[in-house]
Amino acid sequence: MSPDQLQVKAPSGTRDVLPPESSRWQALIARFATAANNAGYGMIQGPMFEDIEVFQRVGEATDVVRKEMYVFEDRGGRTLALRPEGTAGVVRAFVQHRPTTPWKVWYAAPNFRYERPQAGRYRQHHQLGIEAIGTDDPDIDVEVISIAHDLYRSVGLTRVSLLLNSLGDSVCRPTYDQALKDHLEARREDLCDEHRERAMDNPLRVLDCKKKACRDATRDAPRIVDHLCEECKAHFERVQEGLSALDIDFIIESRLVRGLDYYTRTTFEFQASEIDAAQSAIGGGGRYDKLAESLGGPATPGIGFGSGIERVLLAADGEGVFPAPEDRIDVFVVDTTGGTAARDITSELRRAGRRADRAFDGRSMKAQMKAADKSGARTVVIVGEDEVAAGEVTVRDLTTKEQRRIPRSALVEELSQ
Ligand SMILES: [Zn+2]
Ligand SMILES: [Zn+2]
């Protein structure tokens, strides 16, 4: 076997995010975490796999659960699935632990879907999300949407539109489903291959279908927003009023049903015009007032949103915003006396809170100075035989090229100012 054949690669549809690209990820996650913390959301760190039932109970009819899940049996014979989306596991945790409500949590975690790999779509993709469980106050819908909106704005995205819809509840949705079924039944022959057979199982899915046949056939389909009951209507109006009050523009899109079955009332999606239509959604979510019940908990309303890190960064690239932050270090220690001084000084500087680095392997002065330059450090501490003999170090400012000798014992304090 040639060495090439022996080389192990990342599985198809996955990728490594390495420095310096990963510093953008880190910055985005940090920004999101701060925004969520500032709004009273605490971090949840849950398992990446769950009993398969957690996902089956919430979305048996969805493609995500039927066709795209990574399912496996563990050594104890349990059937588990890697999480295909973020919400179900969080609601499972809520049902299991019964925290006081409203329970507000955020996460940054991978999701797994067995999809055909293509540009911008990964089998392991990463999501930033929040969930607010235990209140059906429409103002929390506004809060959740505004956190996403403000995150995109703080990243610098300007060409993002917010689509908004209400899917009604168990009072008004059946009437609407029937109206939609009647509409689709009359046009059954015009639907795409898949939906000609399956439209009646889940008529809402047809609204979401990207095939031209289905889009044409649903152009004048009844709109859910015209079928809302009084309570859903009042809820939806309060959400719109709140978004307007916070200067958040939105478009009502009656086709917006999202890919999962558990949504009720408010659903929303943020689309970036900078990335192609098939994957322009950079985030979205909605209300799931029946989800806790379907996982065996007490009836508890909830709402959340998730946003793909890869998609947000793709949109940022499209708009030329959110560059990678410069991960420069502060001080580089060049030691030509064997490395002991470099070992000790970098450690002391780091303990004093400075970012310090050094070269290894006893490299030449020239090679170490080159490494210092590359590191982006502004200050270089040079330790040669002369300095060691005098109990001093040379401190050079790489910007001004000025240098001076100071006592070794004064170094850390001086560089910590
Ligand atoms: Zn279709
Ligand atoms: Zn209703």
Image (tube, rainbow, N blue to C red):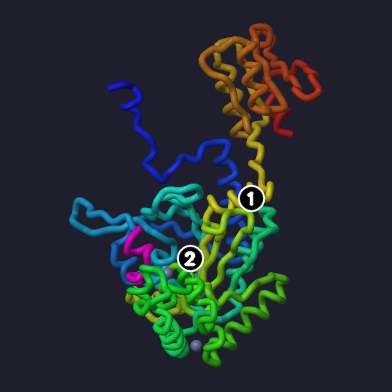
Is 173 located above or below residue 51 in the figure? below
Is 345 located above or below residue 153 in the figure? above
Q: Is residue 20 magenta?
A: no
Q: Residue at the spot x=68%, y=27% of the render?
A: 377
The residue singled out by tag 1 in the image is 316
The label number, if any, that marks residue 210 in the structure image: 2
The quadrant where residue 249 appears: bottom right
Residue 247 lies, in percent from the top left, at 72, 71
100 or 210: which is nearer to us? 210
Is 188 located above or below residue 280 in the figure? below
Q: Earlier in the sequence, mark 1 or mark 2?
A: 2
Q: Would residue 87 be seen by someone viewing this image from the given angle?
A: yes
Horizontal relation, residue 414 to residue 238: left or right: right
Q: Is residue 61 magenta?
A: yes
Q: Ligand 1: does it lie within 8 Å of the C-beta at label 1? A: no
Crowd around label 1: few <14 · some 14–19 · many ≥20 (10 Å)? many
Say which amino acid is labelled 1.
Ala
Q: Ligand 1: does it lie within 8 Å of the C-beta at label 2? A: yes
Residue found at the very far bottom of the displayed protein? 230
Residues in magenta, as a range = 58-68
